Image (tube, rainbow, N blue to C red):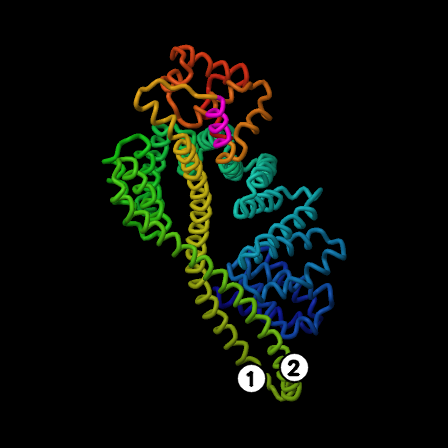
């Protein structure tokens, strides 16, 4: 049946060619609208010299249809970039917003494929402009969703939230529960990376309620993972563990890579819960994953476990392994980008060579065209149909492999981005801890006197030295404090310096020659009356920001 259909397409294209190439383009557009991508490509490839034989309008439509066909088959490459340019230029200038948007949408995905994320952002934004007032909520949802993806890759989390909310509006207008759930999860992800955890939790909970109400049980796997990540970041580790376990329970056993990735998250959760044996159990499982991101996460989390247990010698080799894995992943990413650049360069070189050879081939074809007999033409048609069938069959197999590979690549890229952000946060925490340790060492005389239990009398010069050390180490600590909270007096700032030195209330009472309760009341008065903080945060947490 398929042979007959393809033969009919080829014969129709040959008949329509006699009336003008624009008819073949019209047939290809019809086939593309009917999702007959292979047949549409057969028709378009029957146009031997489209740029020469077609009008400007028909060639622009031909270029758009061919690019969309390649996009559907996940075969976008550097050659598609050259093909799309005349389509974008013509339809943008002619004011045909429907075709212009389609060309820009395809161009944006090509830019993503070639790691040109800024160009992809611009192409999606231009496509969005052409969509305004069209009423095409389906495409409006897609463009805004992909804008959110690009913003996440560029670490522009406010943009991720903004465009995901626009996608949610489109999904609600469409009445599509699956789109709505995806948009809610995307919004929660944006707020998660902006550290607005209450908002992230609100939208993740909304996605959970919607999944139950709309009978979307498969989405619960991803919603549970989002909820687990949010609660972990809030420090509610038991609830986080509960949701991660639910996500694992709902996943099929065949989804082993994702399950092992969740095991690496459980290692860190058990560390925070102080359940070190459980952490080690899941570390052994996650470390056996073939996914390098999961291995890296597991090694890093277990190293923290050992460090927390005071086993620095055991943590060190795991940190070395973690560093090796991160370097390997970074090299893989750089290699992929280099391949994409090489592909673009080779295409530009081949374009010049192909221009010469096409002119030579056209000259030869003009000499032998009328020598071809009807019998050879029929033979050519039969051979062409068979070749198309074989080629399409091979292409289908290749596309399935490429799709699996691209999905894995996207997963790895997301893991890399997440790991980089997490490492930056850890480095900032380590830097703050080093500064506090150094400040305490600079004030060693005071600390030693406290530890000996001696009578401590600090002169104004001693306090000036302590304040000066705090300002040097913490970038103008007391000056920034007084600028932010002008009601703080000199004694208040001295108490803040002692908190920054991590002195206990008993040690502060020893220095200030006051009762411990008096010190406690003074610290509370500084936090509540002078700094306007509520009861949900300590003075130490407030000062950690400075």
Few, some or many C-alpha atoms within 10 Å of disc 1 (few <14, some 14-19, many ≥20)?
few
Q: Residue at x 45, y 62 (%)?
A: 335
On the image, the x and y values in percent for residue 184 come to 52, 35
43 relative position to 337: left or right? right
On the image, the x and y values in percent for residue 380 come to 54, 79
Q: Is mark 1 on a helix, strand or loop?
A: helix
Q: What element carries label 2?
A: helix
On the image, the x and y values in percent for residue 258 come to 36, 45
Residue placed most toward the observer, 68 or 80: 80
Q: Is residue 397 in view?
A: yes
Q: Which residue is drawn at 50% across and 26% down?
A: 464
Label the magenta part by its dominant secondary structure.
helix
Residue range highlighted in magenta: 460-470
Q: Which of marks 1 and 2 is nearer the N terminus?
A: 2
Name the residue beneath numbered marker 1.
376
Residue placed most toward the observer, 539 or 128: 539
Name the residue beneath numbered marker 2.
359
């Amino acid at each position: 049946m398929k042979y007959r259909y393809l033969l009919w397409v080829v014969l129709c294209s040959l008949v329509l060619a006699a009336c003008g190439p624009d008819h073949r383009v019209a047939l290809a557009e019809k086939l593309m609208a009917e999702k007959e991508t292979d047949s549409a490509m057969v028709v378009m490839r029957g146009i031997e010299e489209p740029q020469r034989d077609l009008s400007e309008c028909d060639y622009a439509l031909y270029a758009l249809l061919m690019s969309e066909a390649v996009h559907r088959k996940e075969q976008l490459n550097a050659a598609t970039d050259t093909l799309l340019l005349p389509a974008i230029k013509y339809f943008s200038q002619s004011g045909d917003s429907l075709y212009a948007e389609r060309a820009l949408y395809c161009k944006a995905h090509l830019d993503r494929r070639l790691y040109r994320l800024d160009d992809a952002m611009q192409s999606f934004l231009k496509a969005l402009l052409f969509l305004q007032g069209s009423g095409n909520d389906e495409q409006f949802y897609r463009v805004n969703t992909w804008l959110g993806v690009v913003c996440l890759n560029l670490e522009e989390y406010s943009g991720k939230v903004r465009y995901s909310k626009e996608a949610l509006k489109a999904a609600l207008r469409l009445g599509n529960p699956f789109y709505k759930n995806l948009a809610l999860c995307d919004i929660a992800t944006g707020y998660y990376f902006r550290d607005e955890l209450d908002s992230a939790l609100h939208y993740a909970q909304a996605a959970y309620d919607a999944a139950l109400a709309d009978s979307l049980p498969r989405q619960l796997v991803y919603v549970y993972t989002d909820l687990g990540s949010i609660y972990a970041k809030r420090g509610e580790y038991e609830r986080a563990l509960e949701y991660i376990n639910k996500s694992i329970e709902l996943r099929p056993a065949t989804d082993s890579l994702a399950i092992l990735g969740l095991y690496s998250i459980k290692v860190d959760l058990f560390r925070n819960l102080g359940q070190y044996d459980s952490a080690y159990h899941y570390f052994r499982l996650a470390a056996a994953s073939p996914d390098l991101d999961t291995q890296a996460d597991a090694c890093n989390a277990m190293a923290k476990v050992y460090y927390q247990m005071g086993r620095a010698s055991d943590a060190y080799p795991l940190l070395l392994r973690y560093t090796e894995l991160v370097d390997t992943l970074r090299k893989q990413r750089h290699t992929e980008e280099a391949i994409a650049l090489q592909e673009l360069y080779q295409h530009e070189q081949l374009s010049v060579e192909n221009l010469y050879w096409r002119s030579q081939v056209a000259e030869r074809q003009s000499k032998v065209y009328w020598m071809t007999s009807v019998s050879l033409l029929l033979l050519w048609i039969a051979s062409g149909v068979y070749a198309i069938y074989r080629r399409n069959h091979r292409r289908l197999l290749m596309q399935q492999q490429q799709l699996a590979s691209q999905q894995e690549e996207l997963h790895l890229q997301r893991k890399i981005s997440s790991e980089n952000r997490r490492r930056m946060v850890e480095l900032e925490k380590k830097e703050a801890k080093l500064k506090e340790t150094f400040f305490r060492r600079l004030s060693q005389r005071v600390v030693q006197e406290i530890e000996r239990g001696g009578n401590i009398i600090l002169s104004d010069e001693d306090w000036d030295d302590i304040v000066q050390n705090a300002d040097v180490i913490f970038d103008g600590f007391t000056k920034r404090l007084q600028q932010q909270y002008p009601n703080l007096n000199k004694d208040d700032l001295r108490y803040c310096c002692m908190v920054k030195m991590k002195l206990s209330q008993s040690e502060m009472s020893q220095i200030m020659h006051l009762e411990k309760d008096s010190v406690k009341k003074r610290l509370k008065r500084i936090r509540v009356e002078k700094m306007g903080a509520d009861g949900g945060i300590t003075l130490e947490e407030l000062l950690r920001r400075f």
